[in-house]
Amino acid sequence: MRGIVVKASAWLVIGAGVVTLAACQTPGEKPAPAAAPALEASLGRVELVDWASSYEAGGVVRARQVAVVSSRVVAPVVEVRVKAGDRVSRGQVLVRLDDREAGAQATRASASATGMRLSFEAAQAERRSAESSVVLARATHDRVKGLREKNSATAQELDQVVAGLAAAEARLAGATARVAEAEAGLAAAKAGEEVASVGASYAVLTAPFNGLVSNRQVDPGSMAAPGVPLLTIEDTSAYRLEVRVDESRAHLVAPGTPAEVRIDRSADAEDTWGKATVAEVESVDPALHSFLVKLDLPQSAGLRSGVFGRARVMGPSARVLAVPAAAVVRRGQLTLAFVVDAAGVARLRMLSPGREGQGRVEVLAGLAAGDRVVLAPPVSIEDGTPIAGAAEGARK
């Protein structure tokens, strides 16, 4: 019983102490939380910078030189020696057509030229004979005329040699005309022979330059005709990016204007901006209210026709507010930054971003020039976290 009384008395003393402590505490007052430790972080500033205006447009990469191989005659396709993806050299045979008809025409033209050549030679021989006859007739005429003056020849004999000379000269004129005719016929036959030879060469289609066969549209047995594409060959040594630009941006683009380009290569390749130059600017299309701009691309092993790319043309500079890109925090659809106040405490603030480039982000709203921001905010930072040395830096 005595042990029970002692224990009861001890509990009464403890309870009285608790009541006394509760009575001493002010109603509604909470214990002060422990101060958060200062966080080490690098700081940057929001500044006014000169930012060049720019315009971006998407387009497609195309080879600077593209040749569509087609036939100049109507003929069946006998052989196709290449396929899409093959590399070809200048002068390499690509397609052969049926050349039997062209060959027959060439043979006929050659025979005709040979005949006209023989006719020309015969006409020349005839003219030489006529020239000899004229020489003989003229000598006879002069001899008889001298005898007639001495009354050693009769008038009839003189008339005969005069007529003989006239006839010889007429035969010479005819022979000269036939030589000219034969010469003209020979020239025509030679031209026909050359045309037939050229026509026969149309049966063999060769590569116009070193390049890559990008498309094959014909197989043996097909009928080739003028204007019908058979193969497409691209010069892989030089490419261009073709983009359409709105007509309101015409003042930004002119031949020779420097630009930046980015080519989409693959999912695992890093796409970076490279240098390019505006090569051609076509007229404005009235239907689309835009114009086509062609930019010469630097040589690269990964370029291929049909790849998508973007071009960025720089314009005049303007004064804008910018924050270091390392200070920008993106959470879902929100863009935030930790701004350090005069007390050295990081405050989370939302901002409206604009353009990005050169390690900065344009600030449209939410920050002011001179604001200090936390660069590369660590995961542990939150609104209200003190930054080590930030308060002292603000006083300085």
Image (cartoon, rainbow, N blue to C red):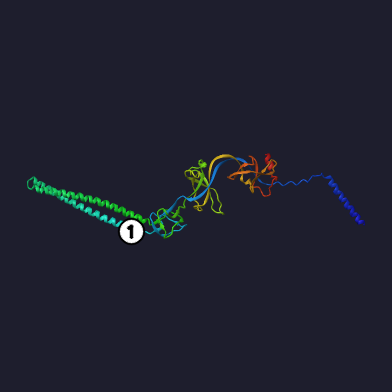
> In the picture shown, does residue 236 fall above or below 43?
below
Residue 219 in percent (x, y) is at 43, 59
Q: Residues within 10 Å of mark 1 (few under 14, many from 20)?
A: few
Q: Amino acid at mark 1?
A: Ala
* Screen quadrant of the N terminus: bottom right
For residue 94, say whether it is visible.
Answer: no
Q: Quadrant of the C terminus?
A: top right
Name the residue furthest right. Answer: 1
Front position in the image: 262 or 176: 176
Query: In this figure, what is the number of numbered marks?
Result: 1
Does residue 78 appear to the left or right of 143 in the view shown? right
Residue 163 position within the rendered picture, expressed as x and y whole percent measured from the top left: 14, 48
Residue located 10% across and 46% down the image: 146
Which one is in front, 61 or 88? 61
Circle 1 residue:
104
Figure quadrant of residue 48: top right
- Residue 160: image location, x then y, percent: 12, 49
Asked whether residue 179 is in view, the answer is yes
What secondary structure is found at the residue carrying circle 1? Answer: helix
**Image location of residue 88, percent across then percent down:** 44, 56
* Residue at screen point 35% across, 55% down: 199
Q: Residue furthest left?
A: 151
Farthest-out residue, front: 287
Residue drawn at the location 22% of the way across and 53% of the way down: 123
Is residue 254 shown left or right of residue 197? right
Of 215 and 54, which appears nearest the observer?
A: 215
